[in-house]
């Protein structure tokens, strides 16, 4: 059974996980489709590629069984799940942002990704701690990804030269 893409009822009830899961699925599918289609279309057809990517991403979010999506996104509380949820969007966004020729767009994108990872790390702090002490909190991976994002931002020219080789 398909759940509406624009079902924001979970936010009003104080539980926004379903909305963020749908949003994450939309952006991940949009980036994958957009980058793939850009390889097949001319650079002047960016509007067409964007429209196709948005339409396909909306259909993916609308028709994907919410139980399967929730099982993947919300019940992956182990280290592998957190690594997947943190590394996969970072690498997708990395290649998506590096595909732009406009340097300011890349820098703003990496700054936004870094801030977003720090916010996620702060919100998840203490939820995934192992043992009775807070010495090892798996959510610190988000802080690490935010740091990596800011390092890419600082060394953006060097990263760009290495990517264009």
Image (spheres, rainbow, N blue to C red):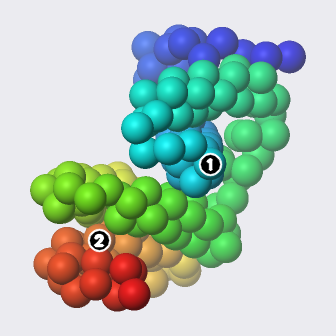
First of labels 1, 2 by sequence position: 1
Q: Quadrant of residue 119?
A: bottom left
Looking at the image, which is closer to me, 88 or 34?
34
- Residue 148 coordinates in the image, percent (x, y): 31, 78
Q: Are marks 1 and 2 in contact (CB under 8 Å)?
A: no
Residue 133 lies, with reference to residue 56, above or below; the image says: below
Rendered image: mark on residue 88: none
Q: Give the quarter of the figure containing the C terminus.
A: bottom left
Looking at the image, which is closer to me, 11 or 154?
154
Looking at the image, which is closer to me, 12 or 44?
44
Secondary element at tag 1:
helix
- In three-dimensional space, the C-alpha distance between marks 1 and 2, rounded to whole angstroms, equals 29 Å
**Residue at horizontal 56%, vertical 64%?**
88
Q: Is residue 54 visible?
A: no
Residue 147 lies, with reference to residue 22, above or below; the image says: below
**Residue at horizontal 50%, vertical 44%?**
42
Looking at the image, which is closer to me, 156 or 52?
52
Q: Quadrant of residue 136?
A: bottom left
Disc 1 crowd rating (10 Å Cα; few below 14, some 14-19, many 20+) is few
According to the picture, the residue beneath numbered tag 1 turns out to be: 40
- Residue 86 coordinates in the image, percent (x, y): 50, 65
According to the picture, the residue beneath numbered tag 2 turns out to be: 149
Looking at the image, is mark 1 or mark 2 nearer the viewer?
Answer: 1
Q: Is residue 42 visible?
A: yes
């Amino acid at each position: 059974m398909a759940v509406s893409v624009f079902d924001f009822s979970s936010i009003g009830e104080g539980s926004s996980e379903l909305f963020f899961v749908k949003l994450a699925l939309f952006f991940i599918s949009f980036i994958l489709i957009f980058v793939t289609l850009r390889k097949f279309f001319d650079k002047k057809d960016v509007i067409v590629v964007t429209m196709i990517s948005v339409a396909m991403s909306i259909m993916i979010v609308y028709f994907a069984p919410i139980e399967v999506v929730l099982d993947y996104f919300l019940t992956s509380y182990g280290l592998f799940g957190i690594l997947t949820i943190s590394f996969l969007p970072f690498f997708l966004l990395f290649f998506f942002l590096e595909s732009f020729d406009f340097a300011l767009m890349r820098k703003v994108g990496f700054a936004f990704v870094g801030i977003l990872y720090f916010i996620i790390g702060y919100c998840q702090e203490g939820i995934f701690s192992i043992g009775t002490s807070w010495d090892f909190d798996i959510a610190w991976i988000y802080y690490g990804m935010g740091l990596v994002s800011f390092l890419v931002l600082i060394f953006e020219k060097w990263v760009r030269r290495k990517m264009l080789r």
